[in-house]
Amino acid sequence: DQQVKQNSPSLSVQEGRISILNCDYTNSMFDYFLWYKKYPAEGPTFLISISSIKDKNEDGRFTVFLNKSAKHLSLHIVPSQPGDSAVYFCAASPRSANTGTASKLTFGTGTRLQVTL
Amino acid sequence: NAGVTQTPKFRVLKTGQSMTLLCAQDMNHEYMYWYRQDPGMGLRLIHYSVGEGTTAKGEVPDGYNVSRLKKQNFLLGLESAAPSQTSVYFCASSYAIAYEQYFGPGTRLTVT
């Protein structure tokens, strides 16, 4: 049972345009969400996070939006740059449920973003 | 400050051979994790540890063993490698269980 889903395995966007990566979740206990970026032959690196008390979090060119009623989050990259070409993973956790080790992160399957010139 | 390091970076094993993957972190994190990444499957948790001397099973623990004898090290062992264990293995650590995880560069393992 995939609790965190990234239904688009790949996305191609022109340089300078907006990239929108989507993520859906099924577990209503999830209240903390993260995005990771992964380049080939490297480990994932943390990009941005959002708590369920917010519906938007911004960090430079990266903005994460959370729609709790739809159990959906998205990562917007504006403007997209060639260096943004990577695989993006979303992850979720029932952080404030204080369920001990059940609070560990659950990852999606990833979306490969290619930013073209 | 090296963060999370993994040894080795690449390895080829024959079916039935054994090996140990080493993960080290210098951030004084309590929590450490081993994941495998396969095409179309994302990151799947193999085992994790909530502190020195502790280990716990994750989503796909069969065929693997782990040990956390020192806080900064987390070892992943394959006692009898199988072709199904061909994968890229990532180690990660975090300050607490649901906080950001910091990943190592990965180990690419091929079992023939």
Image: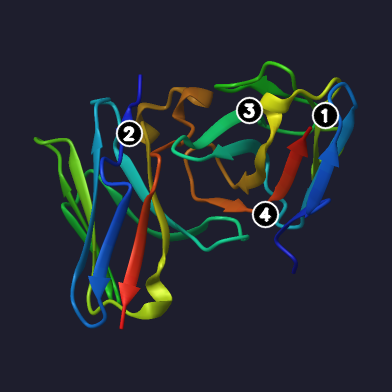
Chain under numbered label 2: A
Please state which of residues B109 and A68 is positioned toward the viewer in this rendering: B109
Work out whether residue B32 can be spotted: no
Q: Are marks 2 and 3 on the same chain?
A: no
Residue A72: x and y in percent read 18, 41
Residue A84: x and y in percent read 39, 72
User: Where residue A64 is drawn, which disc sits there?
Assistant: none
Q: Is residue A33 above or below residue B79?
A: below
Mark positioned earlier in the residue sequence (4 or 1)? 1
Q: Which residue is mark 2?
A: A4
Binning the other alpha carbons within 10 Å of mark 2 as few (below 14), some (14 to 19) or many (20 upward) gives: many
Q: Which residue is mark 3?
A: B46
Measure how far apart labels 1 and 2 are at the Cα level.
Answer: 28 Å
Chain under numbered label 3: B
Is B18 left or right of B81, judged from the image as shown? right
Element type at mark 1:
strand
The residue at the point 62 percent across, 60 percent down is A41
Measure how far apart labels 1 and 3 are at the Cα level.
Answer: 11 Å
